[in-house]
Amino acid sequence: MDKKGLWLAIGAYGLWGLFPLYWKQLQAIPSTEIVAHRVVWSLVFLVGVVLVSRRAGEVRRAFRRKKVVLVYSVTAILLAANWLVFIWGINAGYMVEVSLGYFINPLVSVLLGVIFFRERLRIGQWTAIAIAAVGVGYLTVRYGQLPWIALVLAFSFGSYGLIKKLASLDALIGQTMEMAMLTVPATLFLVYREATMGGGFVHAGVLPTVMLILGGAVTAIPLLMFTGAARRIPLSVVGLLQYIAPTMQFSIGVWVYGEDFSPARVVGFSIIWFALAIYTAEGLYRRRKNRREMAVAVPLEL
């Protein structure tokens, strides 16, 4: 296995897992404003990367293709919604529920594939989805409402990945397009905030201002690391490593910020973790079986 790819993946998921610690430092600033700054400074960072890598022509050509613009307009909206709920959830004290969204995201992605691409699931995958649904149902009954933060995060990011399957651009060009589309409304919103209420930029202090600016690099770097990793290591390994981020987010919420993890939540989360264990084990078994079948298959010689 490519060691560089492995470490890139671990680094990407590790940084995503540490995101709550970063955005929590900006909780005095409204989440909508944080997201707007994240968009603007992400574009600044990505444009710099595009220029250094001499790929500006690819971005211009992408904007001339109507279908590509339509697809990335939708993914940009989904990404902005995901970021907003993610940051609001963290700063409002719902980090544990935020982590739940990314735990169940793989199962949601599989389910969306069935609904929109008519993909056929194996019995193990259906079992995992059914058990996860029981876990979500249990948490809903115990708390009297759906874990909506987790569901919004899981379905928005799952839909984001689903629609990206229809696109042909790599991560750098695609994310640059998304940020470019979001930057105009984000900038107008920031100007409005500054003119009417006084925005957090500069006024909140030196450290928050610097952190807002660096939010662009913080956003883009792990994605670029992940892209590099995905090209070097098997998807089965990526599938296992993806649980690093929500595990770290969950641990930070419980052990660092002391968020509630009552017996009811222990039961609900345990059901969902059991579903994920079945899903992961079934996937590993299937891949190993396929490799064995391919190894013993000998082409007929004429």
Image: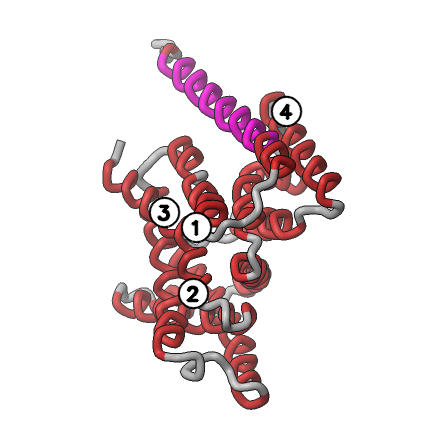
Quadrant housing residue 66: bottom right
| Disc 1 to disc 4, C-alpha distance | 34 Å
| Disc 2 to disc 4, C-alpha distance | 40 Å
Disc 4 is placed on an element classified as helix
| Disc 3 to disc 2, C-alpha distance | 18 Å
Quadrant housing residue 92: bottom right
> Disc 2 vs disc 1: which is toward the camera?
1
Q: Residues within 10 Å of mark 2 (few under 14, many from 20)?
A: few
Question: Which residue has dot 1 on it?
Answer: 256
Mark 4 / mark 3, whichever is N-terminal: 3
The range drawn in magenta is 271-295
Question: Which residue has dot 4 on it?
Answer: 127
- What's the residue type where badge 1 is placed? Val
Q: Residue at x 44, y 79 (%)?
A: 204
Question: Which residue has dot 2 on it?
Answer: 25
> Disc 4 vs disc 3: which is toward the camera?
3
